[in-house]
Image: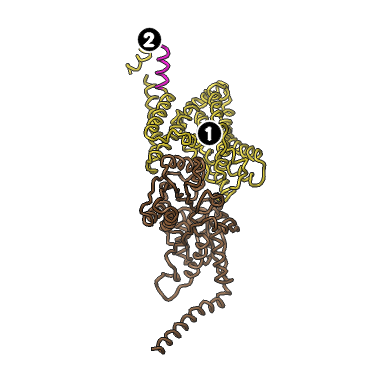
Chain colours: A yellow, B brown
């Protein structure tokens, strides 16, 4: 304890850049960058296929769905909430959009309709949580069940297929060699990351998550921000649904099944806390990347499929334990 | 000698005619009393179970006009609602029930209650092995995988280098993969299973995992999708890497996307289960179990086997026609 207490003074003499570098390395983001680099380097050495363009493309395209879900989840976690319905909202949005397409609705209208449905699902979550003050866990668990149930009832488990080519092009096409889902998702998340850190209405989410009572007393519109947090989360799940169904050329009621758990895991690895008040889109993206690299490594290095889930679970536990350790050190310091 | 033979022939013939005539004589009496058999499914309206119900309807028509059938069960995947549907059929004292188990445990009390009331219950497609159901009619998954393995051995012989897409957990998937391996290595000892990937049961994950698998193992020339979902994912992976024509795909089941990809030539064949036969044979067994004989081998029920393997067909492009227009109810 005494050693920790003397640390800042000892560092004070060191040059400013070294100080910043050290802070970055010991921060969550720094650790994640290092871990990602480490995993990628090891994989690149062990498997010549890792760095091929086709492999990296498939890894990144595969990541986009989780990236979108996990980014929305991060905002909700920052608000000290949770959104268990994202996977199901993805499934339902995908079903509704593809059904509309098979009914002959023009592609742009079907997409707008699908995204609107996702936003409405988020608004229902947000209303019950922000206005009626029902626990987010309960509300979104109910939405998870309702959305998945509707997707099932609408299709009876049938695949929705024979989608128009203009639609499947969205997921399967690429511009300048970059797949369209990646081209849309990455800039979208950069904007989201910037806004969450710098734009006041969104940035208030951190105060609300850390201490909702104090936030309300200081005049922050807690209910409004919370409400829109869930709308954003569900809308991003809707975007993921458009990409998934157009890329795979079908709608299926089980799309997104379990997606909420991967999203929560990635966000927590990325620094979001289930107690609220912390998290970042960049960290979450690095969490998603780490899980995707490990996943890819497992296949490239011919690891047994049975061990994959064990590995993902271990990463989550280690990340959470490291975070708890750092927080305790921080507190004792 | 000849006389003895003729005598045997004649007596066999007579016996045969009597056996044939016996059921013919019965309906005259039974016709007055209508018998209703219920089928209980989950995902009611789905293609697979509509095929099963079509088989049940045709079996009822074959037995006679006194047999009525009806389709019950929830539109969602919920075994507790199925259990309630069974309870309601039991309350109406139906003649027999065919049920597919949304999960193996939840429906046990309802099934056992029906059996204790003397109503034969036959499970089909998905079993509830710990219940008192009289018989299970469905696919023997080991044999299904075995057939797929034989077909792949036929395609590529000793040159087959196989990548398998599966997800750990369900025993039916393990059984399919085991059967596949055994058949392949038996029929083509030089063939190899090069890799197995976890598709987590999803189409999108299958695409990512199979793309990586194909890159890590460029010698793979055929993919076995051990369940319904990875087939389209495998086709997408092959497309991603521009390997069309160099990697064959053996898919599972006949969902619409798989059929479309067979039509477009991206999937070579699929392992087709036979839900129609499940419904058909299921009703035949229930009808028979409804009629106790003097032979004390079947408890208070009539003769019934403990189970039937309804088998699979390997469906190529020329055989998928009937599946493009599934029955609807």
Q: Mark 1 lies on which chain?
A: A
Q: Which mark is residue A218?
A: none
Residue B53, compared with residue A89, is above or below; it is: below
Q: What element carries label 2?
A: loop
Are the two marked residues, 2 and 1, in contact with CB atoms closer than 8 angstroms? no
Residue, disc 2: A13
Question: In the visual, does A12 lie left or right of A170?
Answer: left
Q: Where is residue B62 in the image (x, y as percent from the top left)?
A: 56, 70
In the rendered image, residue B95, in percent from the top left (x then y), is placed at 52, 67
Name the chain letter of the residue that bears numbered label 2.
Answer: A
Residue A129 on image: x %, y %: 55, 34
Q: Give the range drawn in magenta.
A: A13-26
- In the image, taking residue B204 as reference, residue A48 lies left or right, namely left
The residue wearing badge 1 is A68
Mark 2 closeness class: few <14, some 14–19, many ≥20 residues within 10 Å: few
Which quadrant, please, contains the N terminus of chain A?
Answer: top left
- Answer few, some or many: residues within 10 Å of disc 1's Cα (few below 14, many 20 plus, some between 14 and 19): many
Element at label 1: helix
Residue depicted at x 51% and y 66%: B283
Membership of A24 in magenta stretch? yes
* Nearest to N terminus: mark 2 or mark 1: 2
Main SS, magenta residues: helix
Q: Is residue B276 left or right of residue B299?
A: right
Inter-mark Cα distance, 2 to 1: 43 Å
Q: Nearer the viewer, residue A113 or B316?
A: B316
Residue closer to the observer: A242 or B87: A242
Confirm whether residue B32 shows in the render. Answer: yes
* Residue A257 seen anywhere in this rendered image of the structure: no
> Within the magenta stretch, is there residue B23?
no
Tell me: B42 left or right of B12: right
């Amino acid at each position: 304890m005494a050693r920790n207490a003397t640390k800042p003074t000892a560092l004070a003499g060191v040059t400013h850049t070294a100080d910043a570098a050290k802070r970055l390395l010991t921060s969550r983001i720094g650790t994640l960058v290092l871990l990602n680099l480490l995993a990628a380097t090891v994989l690149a050495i062990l498997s010549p296929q890792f760095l091929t363009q086709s492999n990296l493309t498939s890894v990144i395209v595969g990541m986009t769905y989780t990236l979108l879900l996990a980014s929305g989840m991060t905002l909700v976690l920052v608000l000290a909430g949770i959104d268990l319905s994202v996977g199901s909202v993805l499934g339902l949005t995908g079903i509704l959009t593809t059904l509309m397409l098979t009914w002959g609705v023009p592609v742009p209208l079907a997409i707008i309709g699908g995204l609107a449905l996702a936003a409405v699902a988020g608004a229902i979550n947000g209303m019950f949580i922000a206005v009626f003050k029902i626990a987010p866990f309960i509300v979104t668990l109910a939405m998870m069940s309702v959305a998945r149930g509707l997707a099932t009832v609408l299709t009876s488990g049938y695949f929705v297929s024979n989608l128009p080519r203009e639609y499947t092009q969205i997921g399967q096409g690429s511009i300048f060699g970059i797949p369209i889902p990646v081209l849309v998702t990455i800039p979208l998340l950069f904007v989201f990351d910037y806004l969450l850190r710098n734009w006041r209405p969104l940035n208030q989410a951190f105060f609300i998550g850390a201490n909702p009572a104090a936030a309300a007393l200081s005049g922050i519109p807690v209910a409004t921000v919370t409400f829109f947090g869930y709308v954003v989360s569900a809308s991003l799940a809707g975007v993921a649904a458009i990409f998934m169904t157009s890329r795979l050329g079908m709608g299926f009621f089980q799309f997104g099944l379990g997606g909420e758990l991967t999203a929560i895991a990635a966000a927590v690895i990325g620094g979001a806390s289930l107690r609220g008040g912390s998290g970042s889109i960049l960290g979450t993206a690095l969490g998603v990347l780490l899980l995707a690299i490990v996943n890819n490594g497992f296949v490239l290095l011919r690891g047994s499929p049975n061990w994959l889930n064990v590995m993902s679970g271990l990463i989550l536990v280690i990340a959470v334990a490291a975070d708890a350790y750092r927080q305790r050190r921080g507190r004792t310091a | 000698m000849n006389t003895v033979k003729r005598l045997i022939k004649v007596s066999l013939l007579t016996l045969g005619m009597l056996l044939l005539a016996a059921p013919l004589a019965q309906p005259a009496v039974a016709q007055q009393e209508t018998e209703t058999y219920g089928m209980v499914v989950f995902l009611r309206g789905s293609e697979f179970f509509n095929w099963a119900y079509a088989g049940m309807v045709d079996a009822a028509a074959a037995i006679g006009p006194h047999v009525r059938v009806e389709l019950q069960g929830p539109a969602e995947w919920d075994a507790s609602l199925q259990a309630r549907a069974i309870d309601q059929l039991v309350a109406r004292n139906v003649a027999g029930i065919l049920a597919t188990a949304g999960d193996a445990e939840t429906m046990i009390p309802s099934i056992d209650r029906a059996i204790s009331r003397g109503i034969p219950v036959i499970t089909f497609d998905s079993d509830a092995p710990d219940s008192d159901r009289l018989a299970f009619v469905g696919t023997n998954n080991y044999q299904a995988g075995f057939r797929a393995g034989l077909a792949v051995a036929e395609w590529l012989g000793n040159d087959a280098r196989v990548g398998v897409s599966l997800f750990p957990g369900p025993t039916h998937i393990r059984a399919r993969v085991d059967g596949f391996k055994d058949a392949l290595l038996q029929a083509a000892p030089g063939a190899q299973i090069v890799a197995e990937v976890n598709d987590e049961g999803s189409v999108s994950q299958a695409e990512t995992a199979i793309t990586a698998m194909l890159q890590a193992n460029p010698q793979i020339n055929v993919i076995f999708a051990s369940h319904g979902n990875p087939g389209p994912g495998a086709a997408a992976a092959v497309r991603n890497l521009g390997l069309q024509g160099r990697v064959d795909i053996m898919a599972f089941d006949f969902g619409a996307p798989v059929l479309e990809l067979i039509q477009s030539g991206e999937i070579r064949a699929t392992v087709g289960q036979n839900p129609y036969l499940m419904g058909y044979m299921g009703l035949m067994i229930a009808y028979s179990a409804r009629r106790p004989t003097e032979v004390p081998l079947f408890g208070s029920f009539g003769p019934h086997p403990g189970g039937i393997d309804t088998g699979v067909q390997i469906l190529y492009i020329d055989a998928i026609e009937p599946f493009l227009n599934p029955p609807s109810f």
